[in-house]
């Protein structure tokens, strides 16, 4: 891996480990999703080539193009008997998703983090049925103290989870949330703690499946706080890619 990039990954991994130590958790509980929305396709290819397992994009067009490129590349590579095995990346759609883009997205995405309405859930269910598959999704909760644009309101979360659970081609495996942009750590902490409570309530009272176990919280500015509040998946861009030139 490129030196600066390897250094950044190591630093972030170190910060994840330190946050886990403070919270009495194991680093193996945390999945790092590398958010590539600000870097070029050459960096994405380099990540695939370095065996990075989880990649996140916030727009449908970028995700589909990049996942298609990675697929092409890995398929070609597989035919070369001299090339060692590389994992196929898991693609995470982390941004807001419009219903009219679901059809294009679905063949390329592995996990959709941003399901926040029944109408969107139903569209994904219908498209997944046509492809003969089950789509893994997380429900995005809006737990900010100030109104945010996306995410289901806290009070409606359990009901939406039940509705998603009844759709046969959706597999709900957890919850996603963003904290308000706030320099005050206590406010970010309060938001993430609230989401953790909702997630736990859902796990015990609504979904009750062992594979409902992902809590996607934390970005560059707040991932350590998110880990202290129970996050299992951090979505990080800036801290990994700042200053990286290939
Ligand atoms: C861009 C983005 C991230 C990563 O943000 P950084 O601050 O660059 O780490 C995480 N989650 C979502 C939903 C994003 O859009």
Image (cartoon, grey):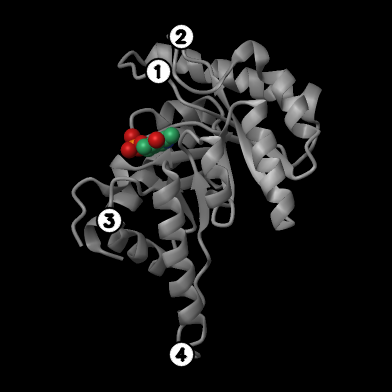
**Residue 141: x, y in percent?**
57, 22
| Residue 228 versus residue 56 in the image, above or below | above
Left or right side of 237 for 83: right
Front position among marks 3 and 4: 3
Q: Report the residue that reaches farthest toward the bottom.
A: 81
Q: CA distance from mark 4 to mark 1?
A: 49 Å
Q: Quadrant of the N terminus?
A: bottom left
Ligand 1 lies in which image quarter?
top left
Q: Which comes sooner in the sequence, label 3 or label 4? A: 3
Disc 1: which residue:
180
For the point 63% across and 40% down, which residue is it?
137
Q: CA distance from mark 2 to mark 3?
A: 34 Å
Q: CA distance from mark 4 to mark 2?
A: 55 Å
Tags 1 and 2 in contact by the CB under 8 Å rule?
A: yes
Disc 3: which residue:
40
Residue nearest the viewer, comparing 114 with 186:
114
Using the image, tell me which numbered label, if any, was put on residue 145.
2
Residue 203 appears in the figure: no
| Residue 74 versus residue 157 in the image, above or below | below
Using the image, tell me which numbered label, if any, was put on residue 82.
4
Indicate the secondary structure of the residue bearing disc 3. loop
Residue nearest the viewer, comparing 17 with 209:
209
Determine crowd level at label 3: few under 14, some 14-19, many 20+ residues with C-alpha closer than 10 A: few
For the point 47% across and 33% down, which residue is it?
96
Q: Report the residue that reaches farthest toward the front.
A: 100
């Amino acid at each position: 891996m490129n030196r600066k990039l390897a250094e950044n990954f190591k630093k972030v991994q170190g910060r994840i480990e330190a946050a886990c130590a403070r919270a009495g958790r194991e680093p193996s509980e945390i999945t790092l999703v590398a958010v590539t929305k600000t870097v070029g396709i050459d960096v994405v290819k380099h990540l695939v080539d370095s065996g990075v397992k989880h990649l996140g994009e916030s727009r449908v067009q970028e995700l589909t193009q990049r996942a298609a490129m990675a697929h092409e590349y890995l398929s070609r590579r597989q035919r070369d008997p001299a090339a060692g095995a590389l994992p196929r990346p898991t693609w995470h759609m982390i941004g807001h998703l419009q219903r009219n883009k679901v059809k294009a997205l679905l063949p390329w995405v592995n996990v959709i983090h941003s399901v926040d309405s029944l109408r969107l859930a139903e569209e994904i269910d219908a498209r997944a049925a046509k492809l003969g598959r089950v789509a893994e999704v997380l429900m995005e909760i809006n737990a900010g103290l100030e109104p945010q644009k996306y995410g289901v309101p806290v009070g409606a979360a359990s009901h939406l989870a039940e509705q998603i659970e009844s759709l046969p081609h959706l597999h709900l495996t957890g919850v996603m949330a963003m904290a308000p942009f706030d320099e005050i750590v206590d406010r970010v902490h309060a938001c993430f703690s609230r989401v953790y409570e909702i997630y736990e309530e859902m796990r015990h009272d609504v979904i009750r499946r062992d594979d409902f176990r992902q809590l996607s919280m934390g970005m560059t500015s707040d991932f350590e706080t998110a880990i202290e509040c129970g996050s299992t998946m951090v979505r990080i861009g800036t801290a990994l890619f700042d200053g990286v030139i290939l």
